[in-house]
Image: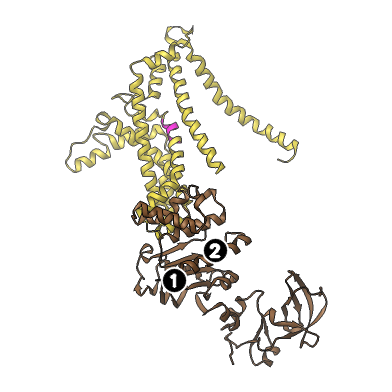
Chain colours: A yellow, B brown
Amino acid sequence: MATKASRSAARLMMAPAVILLLGWMLVPLIMTLWFSFRNYLPLKGGDLGFAGFDNFIRFVTSTSFWPAIGATMTIVVGALVITIVFGVLLALLLDQPMWGQGIVRILVIAPFFVMPTVSGLVWKNMFLDSVNGLFAQIAKMFGATPVEWIIDQPFPSLILIVSWQWLPFATLILLTAIQSLDSEQLEAAEMDGAPPLKRFWYITIPHLSRAITVVLLIETIFMLSIFAEIKMTTAGAFGTKTLTYLIYQRVLESQNVGLGSAGGVYTIILANIVAIFLMRLVGKNLDA
Amino acid sequence: MGKITLQSVRKSFGDVHVIPGIDLEINDGEFVVFVGPSGCGKSTLLRLIAGLEDISAGSIAIDGLDATHLPPAKRGLAMVFQSYALYPHMSVRKNIAFPLKMAGMDPAEQERRVTHAANILNLTNYLERRPGQLSGGQRQRVAIGRAIVREPSAFLFDEPLSNLDAALRVSMRQEISELHQSLKTTMIYVTHDQVEAMTMADKIVVLNAGRIEQVGSPLTLYHQPDNVFVAGFIGSPKMNLITGPTAAAHGCHTLGIRPEHLDIRADGIWEGRVGLAEHLGSDTFLKVDAGALGTLTVRATGEVGLRHGDVVRLAPQEGRLHRFDQDGKAIRG
């Protein structure tokens, strides 16, 4: 892209993609913002005029708001802990030279390609089901009473499903980070008298810290908006109504578009706070 | 104490015999340099001594105790790596203190040793910095500091100066030599640079394809190379090696003469035409095309008014000729 002509040609050719992406992002964003300030009740006659900050106040003062925040946090934190701990361990394992490494690595990534709706259904019916589920079968094999996972253990069930989906992502990022660790550092630590566990703690973990933070932030952004898994399993029952699910209920079950949009604006702000930290971190990463 | 004995040490990676069998004695307090071309097994040998690689056969004894199967940390050796291998997330102080912390040493004693090492190595003002904020030479010193604090029975250096620029390399060379003078600890130093080997070593071990070609003091290797390989490897510029009728006339297969032992004289026995002339000021290196003898390198002291294409006559100095037989072994006497 040396000449002026080729540069403007490049811009022209990129324009359709850029405009499409911008439209894709801006139209829903602006509509959400617009509706959040309107009294929009489709069943009561549609747009009933300007509402000021009423929707925003009603959304946070509703009795469902804090439980929803609690449910969201439980699932996000639980899944983050599991994906990062097991992600590090799996990455360490996959870093070892072994037979069939390529195939194993592809298999590990596989869950990431399964759509959330599908994985929610698969987990619900094939693993967690109290009659036909794999876990129930295993329990019966040992003569135990099968657990009604989705009814009695809704949060562990959801955390399990979400973790299963995001573990590949964490593993992949952490694996590349582990592969970039200078082996001489580990050897130096070995000569310095550090046994394997201390080498892991003092050398490998600090080396991974940045990758772990990136995984943490990216996963947080995406997990704040998990919806399909809940819809497919508990459908918001048993206290698993997250912020996203609450918005869905406000808009589609209560038919209050304005209130739901206000909730949507809160989640946009929340995700952006996390994104700012992520951008800074990635920026720092590029500078170093 | 730091006496290291290798007995028929062998190392194979699968079918590749990197080190087919080495016997070597390193005495306490010696500065030993392993030198050889890349891929000769010198770094592998060092790693075998360090314990970072398992030996395939033979034994290693440190201070008379069998260390063949000891883990690296128990051998009492400290190593300085080519990449320095500093821990990037720790300050200089923590880097240097790391081996002491791993040994569970009392914090006050740790502090005392770190301060002492920092004094020796001029690092006192940099103790709170991270390795990333240091220059190449300073990183090198931190790596040495981390080795010193353990008070090991021997230091192992794996090409420690290869990442430094030429000027810094010369000064670090002196610092390491001075360190050896003051600590009087055994040091094993691996390099491919024969100048480093000649200037620093008490004893040089010349390696080629995993075998020891010759062990001796720098000047022994210079004056009495055991074979053609050592003759060609030690000394800069390289020794001229002449084969053919001229060598046969001296009763050998290969005749060696160092560039500094060829005089340019009107009554010289060999005639040649000057090709390339490198003027260094103190010396002049001439590449002389001497017909059937091949290209000879001549080192003339000071400035010489010779240019490309001039015809010169060369006289080898008496008693400076090296004779080698068919197998490349030196013919003495």
Left or right: where B224 falls relative to B44 = right
Q: Mark 2 points at which residue?
A: B175
Query: Residue visible at 40% across and 58% down?
Result: A192
Q: Name the residue under label 1.
A: B12
Do we see residue B245 in this rendering? yes
Amino acid type at mark 2? Glu
Q: How crowded is mark 2: few (under 14 residues within 10 Å), some or many (20 or more)?
A: some
Amino acid type at mark 1? Ser
Of the 4 image quadrants, the one containing the C terminus of chain B is bottom right
User: In this view, which residue lies farthest toward the left?
Assistant: A143
Of the 4 image quadrants, the one containing the N terminus of chain B is bottom left
Query: Residue visible at 67% across and 74% down?
Result: B237
Seen in the picture, residue B202 relative to A56 is either above or below; the reply is below
Identify the main secondary structure in magenta. helix
The residue segment tinted magenta is: A218-223
The spot of residue B93 in percent (x, y) is 45, 51
Residue A68: image quadrant is: top left
